[in-house]
Image (cartoon, rainbow, N blue to C red):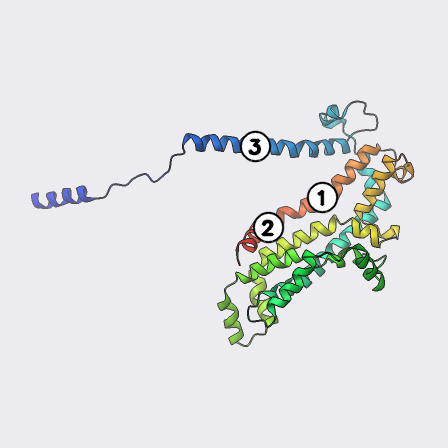
Amino acid sequence: MAEATAKKKERVHLKPKMHNSTVRPTRADKVFQIVVDVFMVLMLIIILIPLWSTVTLSFRPNTYIGTYLEGMFLAPWDWSFDAYKALLGNNGFLMAFTNSLKILVGGVFCALILTIPLAYVMSVKSLPGRKILTTIVLIPYVFDVGMIPAYLLVQNIGLMDHLAAVFLPGAISTYNVIIMRQFFDGIPAELKESARIDGCSEVQILMRIVMPLSKAIVMTIGLYYGVSFWNNFFNAMLYIQDSNLNPLPILLRNILMAAGMNEYVEVSAFGNAPIEAIKAASVFMSAIPMVIAYPFIQKYFTKGTMVGAVKG
């Protein structure tokens, strides 16, 4: 009994001591964290002030008298929805909003249909002439063709006064193709080789193996294209002359120009709402689709961007 007790005490003494592996932050680390927190709070305030100013301006009543700073603290029970009622009740705004939605949906669909196969082909290392294809894709990224050749091309193929003229010239972005190709390069080659051994074609490999693993990058690139097409102003101004086909950015430009030049022909169609409130409400409503879509894509956005940028 005494021998057993002695062995037990010996095992207790031989038991290694557990050390706390937590690293305590130094004073410099704490100071750095405080500086970063203060900086981020200041950046948040800088972003929120213009946003809140635009929101309150859109709710400002026609009878308001005061400065912009006082208007930012206008009580909610004094807000007016006349600007939003005027916009939603105006056929021109609803038509422009519909045209922008058509451009958004059609543009994202066409861009992904063209970008995904091109990026996958460039990721196939056994492809003959892969370097030449990559060089051809990179040339437009470095050397812009210019506005006049692009305009003549759109005119010659009969896309003038078509919504497709807004998104087709930019349906393939070299930057987005490169990011997607880097993501495809990160997919294990063994999966593709096993599919080839089983008799799958390259199209089947893309659709059945690569695409199910690429939701993150597809959603990320789709968001890039969506924001670009939704805010596209220059192509619509160049290629669309029919006022019934004007997207939302063109309508906002017309409202701003009419208000700035005291030409109330365009603005008077929106009723008795204040001009400044109409401009602010137009800007706020034009951002709603992207604000709604981003939370659903956010979980894919960070992963798709990081993997596409690091791999390769």
Give the residue at x 77% y 37%: 281
- Secondary structure of the residue carrying tag 2 is helix
Q: Position of residue 135 (x, y in %)?
A: 64, 63
Residue picked out by circle 2:
301
Q: Looking at the image, which is closer to me, 281 or 27?
A: 27
Nearest the eye: 263 or 210: 263
Between discs 1 and 2, the one toward the N terminus = 1
| Side (left or right) of 223 relative to 200 | right
In the picture as drawn, the residue positioned furthest to the left comes out as 2
Q: Nearer the viewer, mark 1 or mark 3?
A: 3
Instruction: For the N terminus, give its image quadrant.
Output: top left
Alpha-carbon neighbours of circle 3 within 10 Å: few (<14), some, or many (≥20)?
few
Type of amino acid at the residue the image marks with label 1: Ile
- Residue 218 position, x and y percent, is 62, 57
Q: Which residue is mark 3?
A: 39
Q: Quadrant of residue 38?
A: top right
